[in-house]
Image (tube, helix red, strand yellow):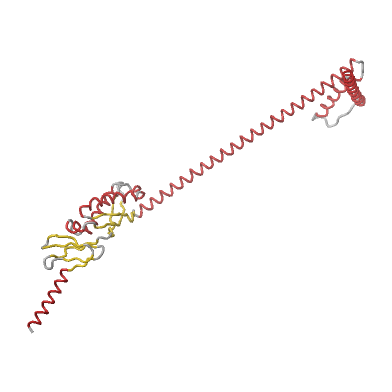
């Protein structure tokens, strides 16, 4: 009976010894081993053995990337605007030994560290700069917090500002300011559009005046050319009449008299004061003179044609 009890006690002791000596560490964790309260080594993930009753597990650290929520806090900007902000921090323990023995309560220490740096970074900025430079704020916070946590064996991968909330009255003032800026830009654009339209209208009128002037110039050239041809025709007619007078034809003299007579009748007809115009009986003689001029012109044309034929036959 005593032997059986001894055997049971021995088996229980061996079982307890095995449980105490064999340690299975999960993936993504690091366990520190202490011997009589002093750090000895770090157990890697998998099956590990320690000295029973001498060694013990000191700290179990999570080596995966973790998320740390930063509680909201009030921050005063450099232009004395009070805003409420909160953030989130992502970190990873790289050295379980430092994270276990270099700092007490790592999570609380990191929360306070991030909150302090948020107040320092945001407090050095004006409100407009604070609201428009979120990436710059995150970058500065990351550099400061990562440098501060390096002695703790922690790598800070990201620090993100989740929200920056100004007071309600300040939000309303900013909305009114934005509305005023947009109305100002709209008025400027409208004025620029009206100015551009006026410039286009002026350019169109200028082009129209240029085209009108070119048209008038072309018409004046055509009119001058017509007057020149008319003058040449009158000169040829006068030459023909003069030749007829030199040859003793009395009808040529009547041509000049008829021309003056017709001009006088034209001016009389154009007068605004004359409603009734009396034509003298001598108009028939004027018409006869005009007919005589036609005979003179035909005689002149016939003479020139005959002269041309004689010249041609002489050359032959």
Nearer to me, 309 or 281: 309
Nearer to me, 69 or 122: 69
**Spot occupied by residue 290 in the image (x, y as percentages of width and height):** 89, 25
> Is the residue 288 above or below the residue 190 in the image?
above
Residue ID at (14%, 71%): 17
Drawn side of residue 253 relative to residue 77, left or right: right
Q: Quadrant of the N terminus?
A: bottom left
Nearer to me, 221 or 79: 221
> Is the residue 156 above or below the residue 186 in the image?
below
Drawn side of residue 257 relative to residue 208, left or right: right
Nearer to me, 137 or 104: 104
Query: For residue 292, which quarter of the picture?
Result: top right
**Spot occupied by residue 14 in the image (x, y as percentages of width and height):** 13, 74
Q: How many marks?
A: 0
**Spot occupied by residue 50 in the image (x, y as percentages of width and height):** 15, 65
Residue ID at (16%, 71%): 18
> Residue placed farthest to the bottom in the image?
1
Query: For residue 217, which quarter of the picture?
Result: top right
Q: Is residue 253 visible?
A: no
Drawn side of residue 243 relative to residue 161, left or right: right
Drawn side of residue 96 relative to residue 175, left or right: left
Q: Quadrant of the C terminus?
A: top right
Q: Is residue 53 visible?
A: yes
**Spot occupied by residue 274 in the image (x, y as percentages of width and height):** 82, 30
């Amino acid at each position: 009976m005593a032997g059986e009890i001894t055997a049971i006690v021995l088996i229980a002791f061996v079982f307890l010894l095995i449980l105490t000596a064999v340690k299975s560490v999960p993936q993504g964790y690091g366990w520190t081993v202490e011997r009589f309260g002093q750090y000895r080594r770090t157990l890697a993930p998998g099956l590990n053995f320690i000295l029973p009753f001498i060694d013990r597990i000191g700290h179990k650290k999570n080596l995966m990337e973790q998320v740390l929520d930063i509680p909201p806090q009030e921050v005063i900007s450099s232009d004395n605007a009070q805003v409420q902000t909160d953030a989130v921090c992502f970190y990873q323990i790289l050295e379980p030994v430092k994270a276990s023995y270099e700092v007490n309560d790592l999570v609380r220490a990191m929360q306070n560290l991030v909150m302090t740096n948020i107040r320092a970074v945001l407090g050095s900025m004006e409100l407009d700069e604070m609201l428009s430079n979120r990436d710059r704020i995150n970058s500065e916070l990351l550099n400061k917090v990562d440098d501060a946590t390096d002695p703790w064996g922690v790598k800070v991968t990201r620090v993100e500002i989740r929200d920056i909330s100004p007071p309600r009255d300040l939000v309303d003032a900013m909305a009114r300011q934005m509305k005023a800026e947009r109305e100002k830009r709209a008025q400027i654009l409208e004025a620029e559009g009206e100015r551009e339209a006026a410039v286009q209208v002026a350019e169109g009128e200028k082009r129209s005046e240029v085209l009108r002037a070119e048209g008038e110039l072309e018409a004046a050239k055509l009119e001058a050319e017509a007057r020149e041809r008319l003058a040449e025709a009158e000169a040829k007619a006068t030459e023909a009449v003069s030749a007829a007078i030199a040859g003793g034809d009395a009808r040529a003299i009547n041509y000049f008299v008829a021309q003056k007579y017709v001009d006088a009748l034209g001016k009389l007809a154009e007068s605004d004061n004359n409603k009734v115009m009396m034509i003298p009986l001598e108009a028939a003689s004027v018409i006869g003179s005009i007919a005589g001029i036609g005979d003179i012109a035909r005689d002149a044309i016939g003479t020139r044609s005959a002269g041309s034929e004689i010249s041609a036959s002489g050359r032959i």
